[in-house]
Image (tube, helix red, strand yellow):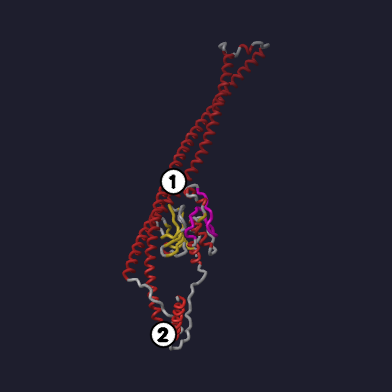
Amino acid sequence: MGKRRGSRAFMIATSLSLVISMAVPATAVAVPPPPPNPSDSELSAGRTEAKAKAGKVGELTNQLAKAEARLMELQAEVEAKMEDANKALVDLETAEELAAKAKADAEAAKRESDSAGQSIENARKQLDEFAAGSYKQGTTVGSMSAYMGAKSPEDLLARAQLLNAVSGSELDALESMERARTVKANKDSLARAALDEATKRQAEAEQAKRNADAATATAQQAQRDQAGKSQELEAARADYERQLNEAQAKVGGLENQRKRYQDWLAAKQREDAANAAAAQASAPAGPRPAVNRPPTGNAVRIVIDRALSQLGVQYAWGGGNGKGPTRGIRDGGVADSFGDYNKVGFDCSGLMIYAFAGVGIRLPHYSGYQAAAGRRVPLNQMAPGDMLFWATRGRIHHVAMYIGNGQMVEAPYSGSRVRIAPVRYGGIVPYATRLL
């Protein structure tokens, strides 16, 4: 029964199709029933909600930009403090070397002084023994024992002259050794004074190193605290962006419904117009308008696109070359604490190397040298593809690429990823470097 009823329905539908095909020209297409058409109030409410969410996202974006500007300032301070600590370390090593040399000199001078004193004591003992033997008779003739056994007056005179000579040479030698001891004692005194000064300088250098290390640790802690605040703001912004996307999707759904209805209405009007003109012959098609295609091989576009292709790639200090991200290197400080040497990614100058390699430009892996690699233009004349730089106390420490509309692409700092951000004007140098 159902089968026969289905066959009958098919025959009726086929007959209707034949009637329609005979009544309507082949070029007309039957328009389906109209889709839902949301009201203006529904669209307005959805747009208001999306606008509110967008405003909150914009507010959080501004807060995040300020927080990250502060983070970059603190990062610059950390880098400066690290340089101060490195200087203090070099000064300490120099002071330790000078103190060690001064100590060795003082010890050598002390040994010479002590040796000279001992030699004088020995000579003095010999002279005392000689004097005791020569003058114990209360006469200047000499030791009686020295004259015993003289065989003639000539022999006696010769022995007296010998005793006088011996006595004079002993006194001369003693005086010479006294002078030598004085000289060595002076050297010993000067060496000890130099040692005291070197020891003082070493203590000052050690204190300077401790102060520099403490300042570095304080700056690093401030940078970590600020990084935590930035992460909280980033999480809040991400949540509101999700809400914004949902609101926009809702509005988009309503607008799509409205658009589908308008498309249906336009199709219905076309169908009516086609039916009205069914009896007219088709006119030949006119010439197709020329299509203006953008020029190919635009160097600025290539460079920007290469940089943007790395969005989301993690930061790695010392990472990146002309072929892409590479493993980072150790810096002995902040980057090591984030494990950059175990990450594959870019640092700020490495990202520039990769971007400009796309048009055959080779750059050094140092932002200070990159700043001098091209023509410098005033900051108010910066154009997409230009490099922007930041400095602290005259030392350039960061680079990013301007991409237009007040935005830039950068690899900002350890723990972050390649991103697009508003141009930060705090600490920026007053020029852009143009390579293209």
Earlier sequence position, callout 2 versus callout 1: 1
Which image quadrant for residue 215?
A: top left
71 is higher (above) or lower (below) than 99:
below
- Residue assigned mark 2: 275
Quadrant for residue 54, please give it. Answer: bottom left
The question of residue 330 being in magenta is answered with yes
Helix, strand or loop for disc 2: helix
Please identify the quarter of the rendering in which residue 323 is found. bottom right
Percent across and percent down for residue 361 are 53, 62
Residue 142, disc: none
138 up-or-down from 334: above or below: above
Q: Which residue is mark 1?
A: 216
**Mark 1 crowd level (few <14, some 14–19, many ≥20, 10 Å Cα):** many
Mark whose residue sits in front, 2 or 1: 2
Residue at the farthest left position: 41
Can I make out residue 185 in this image? yes
Label 1 sits on a secondary structure element that is helix
Left or right of 294? Residue 267 is: left
Q: Residue at x 53, y 29 (%)?
A: 110
Residue 125 coordinates in the image, percent (x, y): 57, 19
Residue furthest right in the image: 151
Residue 416 in the magenta stretch? The answer is no
Viewer-proximal residue among 370 and 179: 370
Residue closest to the eye, 69 or 80: 69
- Most common secondary structure along the magenta stretch: loop
Please provide the residue range marked out in magenta. 310-331
Q: What type is the residue that disc 1 sits on?
A: Thr
**Is 278 above or below relative to 387?**
below
Where does residue 340 sit, x and y in percent of width and height?
50, 51
